[in-house]
Image (spheres, grey):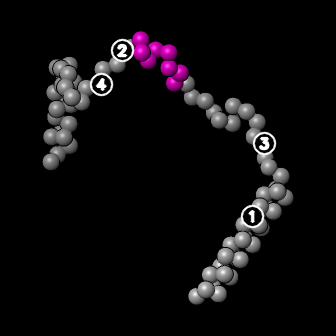
Amino acid sequence: MSIYEELKEMIESYNTRTLNDNSWIIKVEDIKAYDLSHKIPSKLGDIVYENPKVIMDRIMKTVEENLEFLDNLSNIL
């Protein structure tokens, strides 16, 4: 099946402006108020960074818990 065959129905309905089950009808008034402007996330507010020591402590705790789990698993096997 060629691309043209897959799009044939869409092209025909577009050219004749006929409606079918795949038609999308939207009133201009329904979408006029949408804000489609591009916003840069970094401009929305300041980024608050967590204290690196707190992050490192959390990582170390997780590593210790994982090592304990692996040790227990190893003992079971």
Give the answer, above or below, for where 53 lies relative to 63. above
Give the number of the disc on residue 22: none
Query: Three-letter amino acid code at disc 4?
Result: Trp
Asked if residue 25 is positioned above or below residue 69 in the image, the reply reads above
Q: Name the foreground residue: 2 vs 34.
A: 34
Residue labelled with disc 3: 48
Mark 1 or 4, closer to the camera: 1
The type of residue carrying mark 2 is: Lys
Q: 10 Å neighbourhood of mark 2: few (<14), some, or many (≥20)?
A: few
The residue at 19%/40% (across/down) is 6
Can you tell which mark lies on residue 24? 4
Mark 3 vs mark 1, CA separation in Å: 19 Å
Q: Position of residue 46 (x, y in %)?
A: 76, 36
Q: Residue at x 41, y 11 (%)?
A: 29
Of badges 3 and 1, the one in the foreground is 1
Structural distance between the alpha carbons of marks 4 and 2: 10 Å
How would you classify the magenta stretch by its main secondary structure? loop
Give the labeled residue for mark 2: 27
Q: Earlier in the sequence, mark 3 or mark 2?
A: 2
Q: Tell me the distance, in whole angstroms, between the alpha carbons under discs 3 and 2.
A: 42 Å
Q: Which residues are magenta?
A: 29-36
- Write down the quadrant of residue 55 in the picture: bottom right
Q: Disc 3 or 4, which lies upstream in sequence?
A: 4
